[in-house]
Image: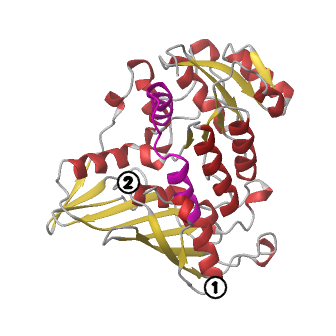
Amino acid sequence: MSKKPINIAIIGLGFGAEFIPIYQKHPLANMYAVCQRNKEKAEAIGKAFGIEKVYTDYDELLKDPNIDAVHINTPIQNHAEQSIKALKAGKHVACTVPMATTVEECRQIVELSEQTGLTYMMMETVIYSREFLFVKELYEKGELGKIQFLRASHQQEMAGWPGYWEGLPPMHYATHCVGPVLALLKGEAEYVSCLGSGRIDENLIPKYGSPFAIETCHIKLKDSDLAAEVTRSLFNTARQYRESFDVYGSKKSFEWTLIEHEDSVIHTGEVPERVKIPDYAHLLPEGIQNFTTQGVYDSDENQHLSFIQGSGHGGSHPHLVHEFLSALDEGRDAYPNARQSANITCVGILAHESAMEGGKIKYLPEFTLSKK
C-alpha cells in the first residue's frame, strides 16, 4: 500500500466504539467512516468523534472507493458474511472473534484472502494482552526453557446476554483460550478431542442442541511433541469470569491468577513467586500508548458513558490496531492471518463436534494449515 493514511471503517459501534479513538490517534490511520443500523445512534457516535461518513447500510459502505479496510465488531453470526462481502469488495478485513461459525465459512474467507491478496486478521484479544506479551517475552529470552505443556480456560456466565447466546455450545466461542496456546509458539492445531460435561438448563438446549455446561478439549500441535488443553463454560457453572492461560516449561512455568486482580505466579523449578505483570505500551506508537491502561474515549469534551468502557482485555486493543495497520503498511500478513485464524476458530467448531460424538478425534482441515 502507499504511505497515505489507511482509511478505516468500523462496523458495529457497541464494543466497536472502543477502537475509534485508537485509530484516530494512530499515525498510519484515518478514521474515515462508521456503520450501525440504528441511524440515531450511528449519527450520535459520528458527531461525538468528529466522523463525517456515517452509514446505516453495510452494503452501501462497501461501495465507497475511499475505504481501504473494515473493522467488523458485529454479533458473531454476522462475522463470516460481512468478512466475505468485504473481501469481495476489495477491502482489507479486521474482524472480532470468532472468524466464523462453520468450517465452510472459514474456508471461504481463507480462499478469498489468498485469491485477492487482501489482508484478513482475526482480532483475538488474549494474544495481544499484557499477560501474553509477558509470557512471550520470557519464552523468547529462553527463560522458560523447553515448553512442555500449555493450558487455557475461558469461563463466564452468559445469562441475560442477547438471545443468540442462549445455549451456545461452549467451544463455539473458544478463541480466547485456543488462541494463546497456539500463538505462543506460532503453532497450529493438527487434531482435537473434546468431552462435554454436565448439563445446562433444559430451556437453553433446543436452540443449538448442545446440552453441556463445560467442554474441555485436548489439542495436538502439528509438527510438535506438544499438546494443550482448553476449557470453556457459558452457563450454569459457578466461577468468576476468567480468561486464563498457563505455560509449563523445563526451567520456569507461568500460572494465571485464580482470582481477578491478584498476581499471577512464576515457578522457577519448584520455587513459586507472585509476579506483577508489566504493561507493554512501549511497543506502540506514542499517540496510542495510553490506551493500554486508560479508558477508551476521545478528548474531555467528548466523554460519554457508552465510550468510557476501560481498556479491558489486558490492554490489547491498541496492540491489535497497531498490528493490523503495520501489516497493511508493510505489505505483510498480520498475525493471525486468515489460515491461522481459521485454525484457531475451527479448533472450537470441531471440538464441539467431538464432544457430541463422545470425544472422537477430529483433524483440522488442510486449508487451516500453513502451506508447504
- The spot of residue 311 in percent (x, y) is 50, 35
Mark 1 or mark 2, which has the lower sequence index?
2
Question: Which of the pair 82/371 is nearer the observer?
Answer: 371
Q: Residue at x 42, y 44 (%)?
A: 129
Residue 263 coordinates in the image, percent (x, y): 31, 52
Say what amino acid the circle numbered 2 marks: Lys
Report the colour scheme: secondary structure
The one of 214 and 175 positioned closer to us in this rendering: 175
Main SS, magenta residues: helix
Q: Which image quadrant: the C terminus?
A: bottom left
Residue position marked by numbered label 1 in the rendering:
357
Specify whether residue 331 is painted magenta.
yes
Could you say which disc has been placed on residue 330 in the image?
A: none
Magenta region, residue range: 320-346
Q: Callout 1: few (<14), some (14-19), or many (20+) C-alpha neighbours within 10 Å?
A: some
Q: Which residue is mark 2?
A: 186
Q: Position of residue 231 (x, y in %)?
A: 50, 70
Q: Quadrant of residue 248?
A: bottom left
Residue 241 visible to the viewer: no
Q: Looking at this view, is 3 or 283 the one in front?
A: 3
Give the side of residue 364 with respect to residue 101, left or right: left
Spot occupied by residue 79 in the image (x, y as percentages of width and height)? 70, 47
> Is residue 233 rendered to the left or right of residue 46?
left
* Amino acid of disc 1: Glu
The stretch drawn in magenta includes residue 65: no
